[in-house]
Amino acid sequence: MTRTAVDTHAPDPGPLGELRAITAERAALERREEVAVRRARSQGYSWAAISLMLGTSRQAAHKKFGRRT
């Protein structure tokens, strides 16, 4: 059986509520990450140093955050 209706006001909406919570947490983490990158750049840290902490390449970090800092 496939469920399509969702009661968004239910106290324990089960797995869909969990997915909603994960999505909210992911958005909050992305905002924190962006703020931290902006702060690091304003304090003079290089894209290489920032990317090392993010576990990505310098180019990827710059592409994702470079226009916003």
Image (cartoon, rainbow, N blue to C red):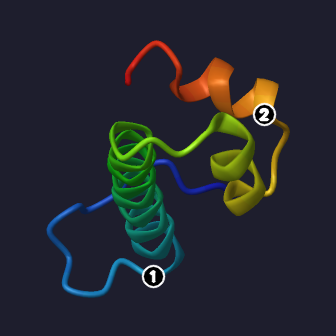
The crowding category of the residue bearing disc 2, from other C-alpha atoms within 10 Å (few below 14, some 14 to 19, many at least 20), is: some
**Residue topped by disc 1:** 14
Identify whether 69 is placed above or below 5: above
Instruction: Residue 5 in the image: state x and y as whole percent.
Output: 39, 51
Q: Looking at the rendering, in which quadrant would you find the C terminus?
A: top left
- In the image, farthest residue toward the top: 67
Q: Nearer the viewer, residue 65 or 20?
A: 65
Q: Looking at the rendering, in which quadrant would you find the N terminus?
A: bottom right
Identify whether 25 is placed above or below 15: above
- In the image, farthest residue toward the front: 44
For the point 68% across and 33% down, the residue is: 61
> In the picture provided, is 54 more to the left or to the right than 42?
right
Q: Secondary structure at mark 2?
A: helix
- In the image, farthest residue toward the bottom: 12
> In the picture provided, is 7 more to the left or to the right than 31?
left
For the point 43% across and 60% down, the residue is: 29
Q: CA distance from mark 2 to mark 1?
A: 40 Å
The quadrant in which residue 55 appears is bottom right
- In the image, farthest residue toward the left: 9
Q: Secondary structure at mark 1?
A: loop
Q: Nearer the viewer, mark 2 or mark 1?
A: 2
**Residue topped by disc 2:** 58
Q: Amino acid at mark 1?
A: Gly
Q: Amino acid at mark 2?
A: Arg
Q: Nearer the viewer, residue 5 or 32?
A: 32
The crowding category of the residue bearing disc 1, from other C-alpha atoms within 10 Å (few below 14, some 14 to 19, many at least 20), is: few
Callouts 2 and 1 close, C-beta under 8 Å:
no
Instruction: Residue 58 in the image: state x and y as whole percent.
Output: 78, 34
> In the picture provided, is 32 more to the left or to the right than 4?
left
Q: Nearer the viewer, residue 61 or 17?
A: 61
For the point 53% across and 76% down, the residue is: 15
